[in-house]
Amino acid sequence: MAGSLVGIAVGFVVLALVFGVIERLFPALRQPIVRPGWWTDLAYWIFTPLVTRAVTRVALIAAVLPVLLVAGQGLDPERIAKGFGPLSRQPIWLQAIEMIVLGDFLGYWVHRWFHSGWRWRFHAIHHSSTHLDWLASVRLHPVNDIANKLAIALPLVALGFSPVATAAVVPFLTLYAILLHANVTWTFGPLRKVIASPAFHRWHHTSAGEGRDRNFAGLLPLWDILFGTFWLPDRQPTVFGVEDKVPTHLPGQLLWPFRRER
Ligand SMILES: [Zn+2]
């Protein structure tokens, strides 16, 4: 526990330095560092690695093991680590590219799914930040987090990709998600339609109607272009948040999706 707290603190300080510099140099919007919601997001930076990650890990193992058993893989850790079938016999770099592309495609659809029906109340927590920056990236309800990871990991493992390689792709996408929320103007210029940028994802978070239900992709805007949800004008979004009355503190946000509207 103490060791993981030190690890979290070190990671946090490194990220704070990197993003502190780029958000000062290329700000999309001028806002104070300790802006509204700052303490709530800081609480998520402790809660997510300690609690959400542990719960998600248990859920993943519980869901992946039956898939491996059904696939006839048994429970031998060495055998599991290799994956199975023709996909697992490809070079690792090729598997990594395929897993990222397929994982991002699955991520697009699970994200879009969370924007409607009963799922929205869980995802609204993530959208409730009225001031968007790198710190706001981890504000995610555990149910949302578990569903995201299961929806991506289960199909990849069922296809035979190595679970170890799958576990390596997740931190990459997680780290990339922090950059996507950063308060910077970056569009990646000529690659604006190729790689998801902070400007691209900040439009996803705007409370203005023009950006609503747009830009669901976490890495490849291709999915938004293909499925008609791409939106990236030559401006920066200026308003963020949701119309729903989401509580402003972490315990309230954890309970809110389970509460009935009065
Ligand atoms: Zn969303």
Image (cartoon, rainbow, N blue to C red):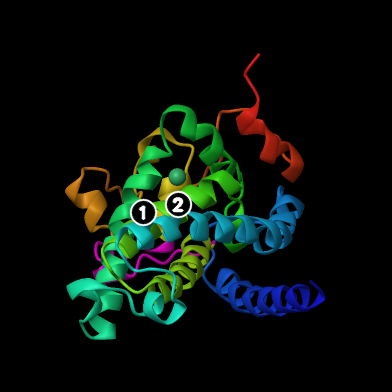
- Image coordinates for residue 250, horizontal then vertical, percent: 73, 45
Above or below, 50 against 223 in this view is below
Q: Are marks 2 and 1 in contact (CB under 8 Å)?
A: yes
Residue 193 in magenta? yes
Q: Is 13 placed left or right of 155 in the picture? A: right
Q: Quadrant of residue 68?
A: bottom left
Res 196 seen here: no
The residue that label 2 is drawn on is 148
- Image coordinates for residue 91, horizontal then vertical, percent: 23, 86
Boundaries of the magenta span: 183-198
Q: Is 248 placed left or right of 74 in the picture? A: right
Q: Is 233 placed left or right of 164 in the picture? A: left
Name the amino acid, label 1.
Gly
The residue that label 1 is drawn on is 107
Mark 2 to mark 1 CA distance (whole Å): 7 Å
Label 1 CB sits under 8 Å from any ligand 1 atom: no
Q: Residue at x 36, y 49 (%)?
A: 216
**Quadrant (top left, top right, bottom left, bottom right) of the N terminus:** bottom right
Q: Which type of secondary structure does the marked residue at label 1 adopt?
A: helix
Q: Is 64 placed left or right of 127 in the picture? A: left
Name the amino acid, label 2.
Asn
Residue 199 in magenta? no
Q: Residue furthest top?
A: 262
User: In the image shown, does 246 or 145 lie closer to the viewer?
Assistant: 145
Q: Residue at x 54, y 54 (%)?
A: 59
- Image coordinates for residue 151, horizontal then vertical, percent: 39, 52
Dot 2 alpha-carbon crowd within 10 angstroms: few under 14, some 14 to 19, many 20 or more? some
Res 1 seen here: yes
**Quadrant (top left, top right, bottom left, bottom right) of the C terminus:** top right
- Image coordinates for residue 87, horizontal then vertical, percent: 21, 73
